[in-house]
Image (cartoon, rainbow, N blue to C red):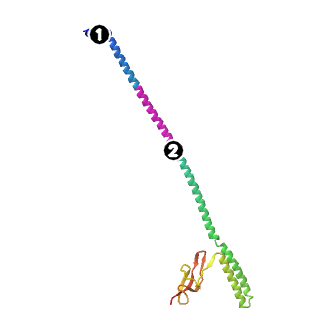
């Protein structure tokens, strides 16, 4: 009964109603404050995210600029190296062309110097022939000239190919005859019809030979 009358009294009491309204207003303001605080927090978080994104973009742009500058520098270095190599190769090509031209022009110089000495002796021999009375003196002069010419050519690298008594070598000899015989082993060179020569390892002319074959 007591609670019933209190409720009745409170229900019609204006002071109680104001107190309740003030409590509701406080609750509403607290809720608004909380909502505002939440909005501020969310806005701050969004601003932080935007700032972080902006910083990342700036860092990425800075890295891109650095990479671009490095690539540019690398390209310039490679281009300079290419230009230097091209210039060096061009100089090398020109030197090679000059050397080839000089070789073609003066390559036989040493050879000609050696031959000139022999030609001089031939000229002297021709002068002496008019005064030679015997054949023996003529032979002696001829042998001297032949020896000098052979020695001069040998100094230039000319070498006579060995033939008689050697085994036939198709790289060095040219068989123009085959002689059936039992006196020599087969494929042995028994006669030289024309001398062969080589310069170093290069065959200038193979020797023309006759080769033994079985009867």
Q: Is 143 in the magenta?
A: no
Mark 2 — residue?
Answer: 67
Answer above or below: position of 141 versus 107: below
Magenta residues, as a range? 39-64
Where in the figure is residue 33, as x and y percent of width and height? 39, 21
Residue 143, picture quadrant: bottom right
Hey, which residue is sitting farthest left in the picture?
1
Q: Find residue 89 and report its horizontal and vertical position in percent.
A: 58, 59
Where disc 2 sits, the SS reads: helix
* Percent position of residue 112, x then y: 67, 75
- Relative placement, left or right, of 151 versus 30 is right
Q: Name the residue: 60% across, 61% down.
A: 92
| Residue named by callout 1 | 10
Q: Where's the N terminus, which quadrant?
A: top left
Between marks 2 and 1, how big is the CA–CA gap?
80 Å
Which class describes the residues within 10 Å of circle 1: few (<14), some (14-19), or many (20+)? Answer: few
Mark count: 2
Mark sitting earlier along the chain (2/1) = 1
Q: What secondary structure is found at the residue carrying circle 1?
A: helix
Q: Residue furthest right?
A: 131
Q: Does the magenta stretch include residue 57?
A: yes
Residue 35 vs residue 106, the one in the foreground: 35
């Amino acid at each position: 009964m007591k609670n019933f009358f209190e409720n009745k009294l409170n229900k019609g009491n204006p002071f109680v109603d104001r107190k309740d309204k003030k409590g509701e207003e406080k609750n509403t303001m607290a809720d608004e404050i909380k909502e505002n605080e939440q909005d501020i927090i969310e806005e701050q978080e969004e601003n932080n995210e935007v700032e972080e994104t902006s910083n990342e973009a700036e860092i990425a742009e800075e890295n891109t600029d650095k990479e671009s500058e490095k690539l540019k520098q690398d390209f310039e270095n490679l281009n300079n190296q290419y230009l230097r190599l091209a210039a060096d190769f061009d100089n090398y090509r020109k030197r090679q062309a000059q050397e080839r031209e000089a070789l073609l022009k003066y390559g036989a110089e040493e050879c000609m110097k050696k031959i000139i000495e022999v030609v001089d002796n031939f000229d002297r021999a021709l002068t002496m022939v008019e005064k030679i009375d015997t054949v023996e003196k003529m032979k002696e002069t001829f042998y001297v000239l032949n020896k000098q010419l052979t020695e001069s050519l040998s100094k230039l690298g000319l070498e006579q190919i060995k033939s008689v008594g050697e085994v036939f070598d198709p790289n060095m000899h040219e068989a123009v005859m085959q002689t059936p015989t039992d006196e020599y082993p087969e494929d042995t060179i028994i006669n030289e019809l024309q001398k062969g020569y080589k310069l170093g390892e290069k065959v200038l002319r193979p020797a023309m030979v006759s080769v033994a074959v079985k009867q």
